[in-house]
Amino acid sequence: MARYGGPMASSRTALSQLVSPDRRLAWSLTAAARRREWERARVLRSWQAAQRAQQRTARRSARAAPRSAVLGATFLAMAVPAGGSTREVCAGLGAFFGTRAVVALASLRSARQRAGGPPVPALPPPLPLPPPVQSAAFPAVRRLDAAGVALRRLLLTARAGGATVAATADAAMASAAAAERALHAQASQLATVESTAATVVDPRARATVQAALNPLLGDLEEGVAAFEQLLAAAAELASASVGGAAATDGVGPATQRLREATDSLAGLAHGLRTVAGLGTVAAAETTAGHRLGN
């Protein structure tokens, strides 16, 4: 085995060198998006299974209640004229089926009170697929991924600065996660418009569609820049926390700058989510209009 260890290890190294870092990043982001879709599907399947089980319970209770009530009443009626052990057996069976009818009625009432079924679970947000490596959006995606990894590490370090600083870091982490999803969606949207432009034959229509790329790319780069500003504020806060320079009440300058960067990024991400899809729709309508005109 030692004789083959060297060549096998070198071939794996050569193979990894053949795959560019951008392509490995694209594969990683695609795998994460697929895993999130599987997770969402699994949660939905579990909820649907619970809903079907509740419906089956309600149907069984609806059938069992009248049947058990009739059997219980019949055995109790048979126990009245009977004597000896027969009377005891009939009375016991009547009590058993009567109790079963009460339990079935209670289960049926509970099922009817929950007529809407089990509550719909909170699904994890979907992750958009990354743009192709050759897309104009991919450099921003590369910067965003590197900034996200560094930001999570720094915010975990900053949480050691006290309860108020930890709360500020947690809020920044939540805002960064939402902004990261919005920026990935923006990059995916830009890639969609790029693919649309590649399929348009008419030069005027293609120029119109390509003109729609500029605002999308500008918003994406602005969002990544705001994300990196949050990263810089987190680095300052983490440095102050480790060095013991952070204010104990959480209102030091580093904490305040992190809050301001968080608010700025949250506002920008909200704007991206609000106008999501408008650029693609406008480009698609323009393309369709030119095609019909030709």
Image: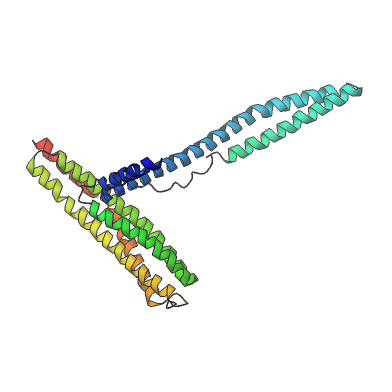
Question: Within the image, what quadrant is residue 151 found in?
Answer: bottom left
Question: Within the image, what quadrant is residue 175 found in?
Answer: bottom left
- Left or right, residue 116 beside residue 183: right
Q: How is the image coloured?
A: rainbow
Q: Is residue 284 visible?
A: no
- Left or right, residue 104 beside residue 139: right
- The foreground one among 209 and 148 is 148
Q: Is residue 262 above or below residue 18?
A: below
The residue most toward the right is 84
Residue 164 position within the rendered picture, expressed as x and y whole percent measured from the top left: 47, 71
What quarter of the picture does the C terminus occupy? top left
Residue 220 position within the rendered picture, expressed as x and y whole percent measured from the top left: 25, 56
Q: Is residue 135 above or below residue 77?
A: below
Look at 75% across and 33% down and name the residue there.
99
What quarter of the picture does the N terminus occupy? top left
Q: Is residue 268 visible?
A: yes
Residue 149 position within the rendered picture, expressed as x and y whole percent measured from the top left: 36, 58
- The foreground one among 7 and 253 is 7
The residue most toward the front is 3
- Left or right, residue 133 beside residue 45: left
- Left or right, residue 278 beside residue 247: left
Look at 34% across and 53% down and name the residue there.
181
Residue 8 position within the rendered picture, expressed as x and y whole percent measured from the top left: 34, 42
Count of marks placed on residues: 0
Q: Is residue 105 above or below residue 85?
A: below
Look at 82% across and 23% down and name the residue there.
77
- The foreground one among 13 and 268 is 13
Look at 21% across and 48% down and name the residue there.
135
